[in-house]
Protein backbone atom coordinates (compact mmCIF):
# COMPACT_ATOMS: atom_id res chain seq x y z
CA UNK A 1 0.00 0.00 0.00
CA UNK A 2 1.31 3.41 -0.96
CA UNK A 3 1.91 5.73 1.93
CA UNK A 4 1.82 9.49 2.03
CA UNK A 5 2.29 12.27 4.48
CA UNK A 6 -0.26 15.02 4.81
CA UNK A 7 0.95 18.62 4.69
CA UNK A 8 -0.81 21.22 6.77
CA UNK A 9 -0.94 25.00 6.36
CA UNK A 10 -0.63 26.76 9.66
CA UNK A 11 0.72 29.87 11.33
CA UNK A 12 3.64 30.22 13.72
CA UNK A 13 2.07 30.27 17.21
CA UNK A 14 4.53 32.99 18.23
CA UNK A 15 4.64 35.51 15.34
CA UNK A 16 1.84 34.38 13.02
CA UNK A 17 4.09 33.81 10.00
CA UNK A 18 2.65 31.26 7.55
CA UNK A 19 4.09 27.79 7.87
CA UNK A 20 3.64 24.39 6.27
CA UNK A 21 3.92 21.40 8.57
CA UNK A 22 4.23 17.75 7.69
CA UNK A 23 1.86 15.37 9.43
CA UNK A 24 4.72 13.93 11.49
CA UNK A 25 6.16 17.31 12.52
CA UNK A 26 6.16 17.92 16.24
CA UNK A 27 8.96 20.41 16.80
CA UNK A 28 8.36 23.56 14.77
CA UNK A 29 11.25 26.01 14.42
CA UNK A 30 9.92 29.25 12.92
CA UNK A 31 12.28 30.60 10.23
CA UNK A 32 11.07 34.16 10.95
CA UNK A 33 11.04 34.61 14.73
CA UNK A 34 13.28 31.58 15.41
CA UNK A 35 11.08 30.46 18.30
CA UNK A 36 10.80 26.69 18.67
CA UNK A 37 7.42 25.22 19.63
CA UNK A 38 6.24 21.68 20.16
CA UNK A 39 2.90 20.28 18.99
CA UNK A 40 1.61 17.59 21.37
CA UNK A 41 -0.80 15.10 19.85
CA UNK A 42 -3.24 14.76 22.77
CA UNK A 43 -5.34 11.99 21.26
CA UNK A 44 -5.66 12.81 17.58
CA UNK A 45 -5.42 15.87 15.38
CA UNK A 46 -8.36 17.24 13.37
CA UNK A 47 -7.93 18.66 9.90
CA UNK A 48 -10.16 20.26 7.28
CA UNK A 49 -9.78 19.92 3.52
CA UNK A 50 -9.69 23.25 1.67
CA UNK A 51 -12.22 23.98 -1.09
CA UNK A 52 -11.83 26.19 -4.20
CA UNK A 53 -13.33 29.70 -4.40
CA UNK A 54 -15.65 28.48 -7.15
CA UNK A 55 -17.49 26.22 -4.70
CA UNK A 56 -20.30 27.48 -2.53
CA UNK A 57 -19.56 27.97 1.10
CA UNK A 58 -19.91 24.50 2.53
CA UNK A 59 -22.91 23.83 4.70
CA UNK A 60 -21.34 20.88 6.44
CA UNK A 61 -18.06 19.19 7.15
CA UNK A 62 -18.35 15.40 7.09
CA UNK A 63 -15.83 13.47 9.25
CA UNK A 64 -13.45 10.78 7.99
CA UNK A 65 -11.12 8.85 10.23
CA UNK A 66 -7.67 8.45 8.77
CA UNK A 67 -5.65 5.54 9.97
CA UNK A 68 -2.05 4.74 9.10
CA UNK A 69 0.04 2.01 10.69
CA UNK A 70 1.49 -1.46 10.37
CA UNK A 71 -0.63 -4.47 11.23
CA UNK A 72 1.47 -7.35 12.56
CA UNK A 73 -0.03 -10.84 12.63
CA UNK A 74 1.85 -13.71 14.24
CA UNK A 75 0.87 -17.34 13.94
CA UNK A 76 2.96 -20.34 15.07
CA UNK A 77 4.73 -20.48 11.69
CA UNK A 78 5.56 -16.83 11.01
CA UNK A 79 4.89 -13.16 11.52
CA UNK A 80 3.44 -11.24 8.60
CA UNK A 81 2.95 -7.50 8.39
CA UNK A 82 0.99 -5.15 6.29
CA UNK A 83 1.25 -1.40 6.01
CA UNK A 84 -2.19 0.19 6.09
CA UNK A 85 -3.22 3.72 5.13
CA UNK A 86 -6.99 4.15 4.95
CA UNK A 87 -9.73 6.66 5.45
CA UNK A 88 -13.21 5.68 6.52
CA UNK A 89 -16.49 7.48 7.20
CA UNK A 90 -16.62 8.67 10.81
CA UNK A 91 -20.39 8.23 10.74
CA UNK A 92 -22.16 5.69 8.62
CA UNK A 93 -24.06 7.35 5.79
CA UNK A 94 -25.21 6.25 2.35
CA UNK A 95 -25.26 9.81 1.04
CA UNK A 96 -21.65 10.84 1.72
CA UNK A 97 -18.71 9.15 -0.05
CA UNK A 98 -17.38 6.08 1.75
CA UNK A 99 -13.79 7.32 1.92
CA UNK A 100 -11.68 10.35 1.05
CA UNK A 101 -10.02 8.57 -1.85
CA UNK A 102 -6.78 10.20 -2.87
CA UNK A 103 -7.83 13.78 -2.20
CA UNK A 104 -5.56 14.27 0.81
CA UNK A 105 -2.45 13.53 -1.26
CA UNK A 106 -2.84 16.55 -3.50
CA UNK A 107 -4.13 19.16 -1.07
CA UNK A 108 -2.68 21.09 1.84
CA UNK A 109 -4.88 20.61 4.87
CA UNK A 110 -5.62 23.04 7.66
CA UNK A 111 -6.26 22.40 11.32
CA UNK A 112 -9.96 22.52 12.28
CA UNK A 113 -10.12 25.56 14.53
CA UNK A 114 -12.89 27.56 16.24
CA UNK A 115 -12.72 30.19 13.47
CA UNK A 116 -13.46 27.61 10.73
CA UNK A 117 -17.04 28.37 9.63
CA UNK A 118 -19.51 25.58 8.91
CA UNK A 119 -21.29 22.77 10.71
CA UNK A 120 -19.13 19.84 11.80
CA UNK A 121 -20.88 16.46 11.83
CA UNK A 122 -19.82 14.47 14.87
CA UNK A 123 -18.17 11.09 14.26
CA UNK A 124 -20.25 8.27 15.72
CA UNK A 125 -17.53 5.66 15.22
CA UNK A 126 -14.55 5.69 17.60
CA UNK A 127 -10.89 5.20 16.63
CA UNK A 128 -11.25 1.74 18.23
CA UNK A 129 -14.08 0.95 15.79
CA UNK A 130 -11.83 1.94 12.88
CA UNK A 131 -9.02 -0.29 14.17
CA UNK A 132 -11.44 -3.22 14.33
CA UNK A 133 -12.72 -2.47 10.81
CA UNK A 134 -9.13 -2.34 9.52
CA UNK A 135 -8.15 -5.53 11.39
CA UNK A 136 -11.11 -7.35 9.91
CA UNK A 137 -10.37 -6.11 6.43
CA UNK A 138 -6.66 -6.88 6.47
CA UNK A 139 -6.21 -9.76 8.89
CA UNK A 140 -4.62 -12.93 7.66
CA UNK A 141 -6.83 -15.77 8.79
CA UNK A 142 -5.39 -18.36 6.39
CA UNK A 143 -2.96 -19.80 8.91
CA UNK A 144 -5.59 -21.24 11.22
CA UNK A 145 -4.96 -21.69 14.94
CA UNK A 146 -4.24 -18.80 17.28
CA UNK A 147 -3.14 -15.51 15.81
CA UNK A 148 -1.65 -12.55 17.68
CA UNK A 149 -2.45 -9.23 16.01
CA UNK A 150 -1.22 -5.77 16.78
CA UNK A 151 -1.09 -2.37 15.12
CA UNK A 152 2.23 -0.69 15.78
CA UNK A 153 3.20 2.91 15.11
CA UNK A 154 -0.22 4.00 14.00
CA UNK A 155 -1.37 7.54 13.41
CA UNK A 156 -5.07 8.25 13.80
CA UNK A 157 -6.49 11.57 12.75
CA UNK A 158 -9.79 12.99 11.65
CA UNK A 159 -10.20 14.80 8.36
CA UNK A 160 -13.30 16.89 7.77
CA UNK A 161 -14.36 17.20 4.14
CA UNK A 162 -16.70 20.06 3.07
CA UNK A 163 -20.03 19.52 1.30
CA UNK A 164 -23.00 21.66 0.35
CA UNK A 165 -26.55 20.98 -0.85
CA UNK A 166 -27.95 22.28 -4.18
CA UNK A 167 -30.65 19.75 -5.24
CA UNK A 168 -27.97 17.11 -4.79
CA UNK A 169 -25.15 16.75 -2.34
CA UNK A 170 -22.08 18.54 -3.69
CA UNK A 171 -18.53 17.79 -2.75
CA UNK A 172 -17.05 21.27 -2.20
CA UNK A 173 -13.45 20.08 -2.73
CA UNK A 174 -14.14 18.71 -6.20
CA UNK A 175 -17.06 21.12 -6.69
CA UNK A 176 -19.29 18.48 -8.23
CA UNK A 177 -22.33 16.49 -7.12
CA UNK A 178 -21.66 13.19 -5.36
CA UNK A 179 -25.23 11.98 -4.89
CA UNK A 180 -28.25 11.36 -7.04
CA UNK A 181 -31.15 13.75 -6.49
CA UNK A 182 -31.69 13.81 -2.75
CA UNK A 183 -34.81 12.29 -1.25
CA UNK A 184 -37.60 14.79 -0.53
CA UNK A 185 -37.22 14.33 3.18
CA UNK A 186 -33.42 14.67 3.20
CA UNK A 187 -32.37 16.71 6.18
CA UNK A 188 -28.79 17.44 7.18
CA UNK A 189 -30.04 18.03 10.71
CA UNK A 190 -30.38 14.29 11.32
CA UNK A 191 -26.64 14.26 11.95
CA UNK A 192 -25.31 15.31 15.31
CA UNK A 193 -23.26 18.39 14.67
CA UNK A 194 -21.42 21.15 16.44
CA UNK A 195 -19.00 23.99 16.03
CA UNK A 196 -15.33 23.18 16.43
CA UNK A 197 -14.00 24.32 19.76
CA UNK A 198 -10.69 22.57 19.29
CA UNK A 199 -7.53 24.55 19.64
CA UNK A 200 -4.00 23.72 18.60
CA UNK A 201 -1.83 24.27 21.63
CA UNK A 202 1.84 24.42 20.92
CA UNK A 203 4.16 24.21 23.94
CA UNK A 204 7.29 26.40 24.01
CA UNK A 205 10.24 24.04 23.47
CA UNK A 206 12.01 25.14 26.62
CA UNK A 207 13.38 22.89 29.34
CA UNK A 208 10.96 23.03 32.30
CA UNK A 209 13.86 22.29 34.66
CA UNK A 210 16.47 24.83 33.59
CA UNK A 211 14.97 27.08 30.90
CA UNK A 212 17.33 26.10 28.05
CA UNK A 213 16.11 25.45 24.51
CA UNK A 214 15.19 21.81 24.08
CA UNK A 215 16.83 19.94 21.21
CA UNK A 216 15.27 17.55 18.72
CA UNK A 217 14.44 16.91 15.09
CA UNK A 218 11.20 18.12 13.52
CA UNK A 219 9.57 14.70 14.03
CA UNK A 220 10.98 14.03 17.54
CA UNK A 221 8.47 12.84 20.12
CA UNK A 222 11.04 13.28 22.90
CA UNK A 223 13.14 16.42 23.32
CA UNK A 224 16.46 16.60 25.12
CA UNK A 225 18.05 19.28 27.27
CA UNK A 226 21.77 19.33 26.66
CA UNK A 227 22.26 21.74 29.55
CA UNK A 228 20.83 19.73 32.44
CA UNK A 229 20.90 16.29 30.71
CA UNK A 230 17.20 15.57 30.80
CA UNK A 231 14.60 14.12 28.41
CA UNK A 232 11.01 15.33 28.00
CA UNK A 233 7.87 14.11 26.33
CA UNK A 234 4.46 15.78 26.20
CA UNK A 235 2.10 15.05 29.08
CA UNK A 236 -1.13 16.87 28.24
CA UNK A 237 -0.22 20.50 27.56
CA UNK A 238 3.11 20.36 29.38
CA UNK A 239 6.36 18.44 29.18
CA UNK A 240 6.91 15.53 31.56
CA UNK A 241 10.38 14.28 32.46
CA UNK A 242 11.25 10.70 31.53
CA UNK A 243 14.08 8.36 32.50
CA UNK A 244 16.73 8.28 29.84
CA UNK A 245 20.38 7.59 29.28
CA UNK A 246 22.90 6.24 26.84
CA UNK A 247 25.35 3.41 26.55
CA UNK A 248 28.46 5.64 26.52
CA UNK A 249 30.65 5.71 23.44
CA UNK A 250 33.32 8.34 23.04
CA UNK A 251 34.53 7.48 19.53
CA UNK A 252 33.63 9.56 16.49
CA UNK A 253 31.28 8.46 13.70
CA UNK A 254 28.67 7.04 16.02
CA UNK A 255 24.94 7.47 15.66
CA UNK A 256 22.87 6.88 18.77
CA UNK A 257 19.63 5.01 18.08
CA UNK A 258 16.92 5.22 20.76
CA UNK A 259 15.35 2.11 22.33
CA UNK A 260 12.61 1.82 24.93
CA UNK A 261 13.78 -0.48 27.70
CA UNK A 262 10.61 -1.58 29.44
CA UNK A 263 10.12 -3.70 32.53
CA UNK A 264 6.72 -5.35 32.64
CA UNK A 265 4.67 -7.63 34.84
CA UNK A 266 3.87 -10.75 32.85
CA UNK A 267 1.27 -13.35 33.73
CA UNK A 268 0.26 -16.50 31.86
CA UNK A 269 3.84 -17.40 31.00
CA UNK A 270 6.97 -17.24 33.21
CA UNK A 271 9.12 -14.36 32.00
CA UNK A 272 10.34 -12.38 34.98
CA UNK A 273 14.07 -12.99 34.84
CA UNK A 274 16.92 -13.66 32.48
CA UNK A 275 16.75 -17.33 33.58
CA UNK A 276 13.11 -17.45 32.41
CA UNK A 277 14.09 -15.90 29.08
CA UNK A 278 16.89 -18.43 28.58
CA UNK A 279 14.33 -21.16 29.12
CA UNK A 280 11.42 -20.00 26.95
CA UNK A 281 13.69 -18.76 24.14
CA UNK A 282 15.71 -21.97 24.44
CA UNK A 283 18.95 -19.94 24.44
CA UNK A 284 22.01 -22.12 23.78
CA UNK A 285 23.51 -21.26 27.16
CA UNK A 286 23.83 -23.05 30.46
CA UNK A 287 21.59 -21.26 32.96
CA UNK A 288 23.64 -19.77 35.77
CA UNK A 289 22.55 -19.23 39.35
CA UNK A 290 22.51 -15.40 39.27
CA UNK A 291 20.23 -15.26 36.23
CA UNK A 292 17.14 -15.62 38.36
CA UNK A 293 17.97 -12.28 39.96
CA UNK A 294 18.33 -10.35 36.70
CA UNK A 295 14.95 -8.89 35.82
CA UNK A 296 13.77 -9.31 32.25
CA UNK A 297 13.17 -6.20 30.12
CA UNK A 298 11.85 -5.62 26.63
CA UNK A 299 14.08 -3.56 24.32
CA UNK A 300 11.98 -2.03 21.56
CA UNK A 301 13.19 0.44 18.89
CA UNK A 302 11.91 3.96 19.65
CA UNK A 303 12.17 4.88 15.98
CA UNK A 304 10.24 4.02 12.85
CA UNK A 305 11.82 1.54 10.52
CA UNK A 306 10.27 -1.01 8.17
CA UNK A 307 8.30 -3.72 9.92
CA UNK A 308 10.63 -6.68 9.49
CA UNK A 309 13.62 -4.66 10.72
CA UNK A 310 11.66 -3.22 13.63
CA UNK A 311 10.87 -6.74 14.84
CA UNK A 312 14.39 -8.00 14.07
CA UNK A 313 16.02 -5.25 16.17
CA UNK A 314 13.48 -5.63 18.99
CA UNK A 315 13.98 -9.38 19.10
CA UNK A 316 17.76 -9.16 18.92
CA UNK A 317 18.09 -6.56 21.68
CA UNK A 318 15.49 -8.25 23.89
CA UNK A 319 17.32 -11.58 23.62
CA UNK A 320 20.66 -9.84 24.29
CA UNK A 321 19.34 -8.10 27.45
CA UNK A 322 22.17 -5.51 27.44
CA UNK A 323 23.53 -4.96 30.94
CA UNK A 324 25.85 -2.04 30.18
CA UNK A 325 25.93 0.86 32.58
CA UNK A 326 23.39 3.44 31.38
CA UNK A 327 24.69 6.99 31.83
CA UNK A 328 22.07 9.70 32.29
CA UNK A 329 23.71 12.15 29.93
CA UNK A 330 23.03 13.46 26.42
CA UNK A 331 25.97 12.01 24.43
CA UNK A 332 28.13 14.25 22.26
CA UNK A 333 27.43 12.25 19.06
CA UNK A 334 24.49 12.42 16.65
CA UNK A 335 21.15 11.29 18.03
CA UNK A 336 18.37 9.74 15.98
CA UNK A 337 14.92 11.13 16.88
CA UNK A 338 12.36 9.17 18.87
CA UNK A 339 9.45 8.59 16.47
CA UNK A 340 7.69 5.67 18.21
CA UNK A 341 6.14 6.62 21.57
CA UNK A 342 6.48 4.21 24.47
CA UNK A 343 2.71 3.55 24.30
CA UNK A 344 3.21 2.12 20.79
CA UNK A 345 6.36 0.20 21.69
CA UNK A 346 4.29 -1.68 24.27
CA UNK A 347 1.96 -2.88 21.51
CA UNK A 348 4.78 -4.99 20.07
CA UNK A 349 5.48 -7.18 23.14
CA UNK A 350 3.53 -10.28 22.10
CA UNK A 351 4.72 -10.05 18.49
CA UNK A 352 8.33 -10.00 19.77
CA UNK A 353 7.66 -12.92 22.11
CA UNK A 354 5.99 -14.87 19.28
CA UNK A 355 9.28 -14.66 17.40
CA UNK A 356 11.57 -16.08 20.09
CA UNK A 357 9.58 -18.64 22.08
CA UNK A 358 10.81 -22.18 21.49
CA UNK A 359 9.40 -24.72 20.97
CA UNK A 360 6.48 -22.90 19.40
CA UNK A 361 4.08 -25.79 19.83
CA UNK A 362 4.44 -25.55 23.63
CA UNK A 363 4.44 -21.81 24.11
CA UNK A 364 2.46 -20.25 21.26
CA UNK A 365 -0.95 -21.51 22.47
CA UNK A 366 -0.32 -19.67 25.78
CA UNK A 367 0.27 -16.28 24.12
CA UNK A 368 -3.33 -15.15 23.50
CA UNK A 369 -4.00 -15.26 27.26
CA UNK A 370 -0.69 -13.78 28.40
CA UNK A 371 -1.18 -10.45 30.20
CA UNK A 372 1.63 -7.91 30.05
CA UNK A 373 1.51 -4.82 32.24
CA UNK A 374 4.28 -2.26 31.69
CA UNK A 375 5.81 -1.16 35.00
CA UNK A 376 8.57 1.26 34.19
CA UNK A 377 10.58 2.35 31.21
CA UNK A 378 13.82 4.08 30.28
CA UNK A 379 14.79 5.59 26.95
CA UNK A 380 18.24 4.23 26.13
CA UNK A 381 20.41 5.58 23.31
CA UNK A 382 22.54 2.78 21.85
CA UNK A 383 25.66 3.70 19.82
CA UNK A 384 25.92 2.37 16.26
CA UNK A 385 29.09 2.95 14.27
CA UNK A 386 28.57 4.57 10.88
CA UNK A 387 29.93 2.28 8.18
CA UNK A 388 29.76 2.88 4.46
CA UNK A 389 26.26 1.46 3.98
CA UNK A 390 25.39 0.10 7.39
CA UNK A 391 25.13 1.18 10.97
CA UNK A 392 26.92 -1.39 13.08
CA UNK A 393 26.50 -2.24 16.74
CA UNK A 394 29.59 -4.35 17.36
CA UNK A 395 28.89 -5.39 20.96
CA UNK A 396 25.46 -6.83 20.17
CA UNK A 397 26.27 -7.82 16.59
CA UNK A 398 23.54 -5.88 14.87
CA UNK A 399 23.57 -4.01 11.60
CA UNK A 400 21.02 -1.74 10.00
CA UNK A 401 21.20 -0.41 6.47
CA UNK A 402 21.40 3.40 6.55
CA UNK A 403 18.95 3.75 3.63
CA UNK A 404 16.28 2.06 5.78
CA UNK A 405 16.45 4.88 8.32
CA UNK A 406 16.39 7.56 5.65
CA UNK A 407 13.17 6.20 4.10
CA UNK A 408 11.31 5.56 7.37
CA UNK A 409 9.84 9.06 7.58
CA UNK A 410 6.52 8.27 5.96
CA UNK A 411 5.81 5.00 7.78
ZN1 LIG B 1 7.43 32.79 14.21
ZN1 LIG C 1 17.41 21.64 31.22
Image (cartoon, rainbow, N blue to C red):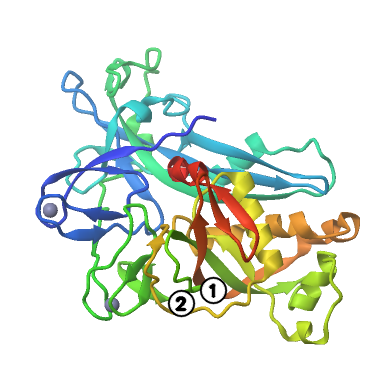
Q: Which residue corresponds to the image point at 81% horizontal and 39% vertical from the top-left?
A: 143
Residue situated furthest top in the rendering? 181
- Determine crowd level at label 2: few under 14, some 14-19, many 20+ residues with C-alpha closer than 10 A: few
Q: Is mark 1 within 8 Å of ligand 2?
A: no
Q: Which residue corresponds to the image point at 82% horizontal and 86% vertical from the top-left?
A: 289
The answer to whether 146 is drawn above or below residue 366 in the figure is above
| Residue indicated by mark 2 | 243
| Nearest the eye: 35 or 156 | 35
Q: Secondary structure at mark 1?
A: strand
| Residue indicated by mark 1 | 377
Q: Does residue 51 appear to the left or right of 125 in the view shown?
A: left
| Nearest the eye: 353 or 236 | 353
x%, y% of residue 383?
50, 64
Residue 291 visible in rendering: yes
Q: Are marks 1 and 2 in contact (CB under 8 Å)?
A: yes
Q: Earlier in the sequence, mark 1 or mark 2?
A: 2
Q: Does residue 21 appear to the left or right of 294 in the view shown?
A: left
x%, y% of residue 90?
45, 39
x%, y% of residue 205?
25, 65
Q: Secondary structure at mark 2?
A: loop
The answer to whether 286 is drawn above or below residue 188 in the figure is below
Amino acid sequence: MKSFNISIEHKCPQCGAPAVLEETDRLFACPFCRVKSFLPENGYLRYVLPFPDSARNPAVYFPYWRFKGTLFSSNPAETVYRFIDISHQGTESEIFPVSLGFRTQALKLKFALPETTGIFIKPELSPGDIVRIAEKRFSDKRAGGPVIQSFIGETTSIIYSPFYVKDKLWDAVLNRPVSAALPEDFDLNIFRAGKPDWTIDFIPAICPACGWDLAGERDSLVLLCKNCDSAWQPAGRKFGKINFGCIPESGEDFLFLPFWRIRAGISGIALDSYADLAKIANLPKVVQDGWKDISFKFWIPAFKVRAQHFIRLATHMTLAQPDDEIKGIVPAGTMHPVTIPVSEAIESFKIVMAGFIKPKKDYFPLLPDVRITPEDFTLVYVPFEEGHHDLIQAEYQMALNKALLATAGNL
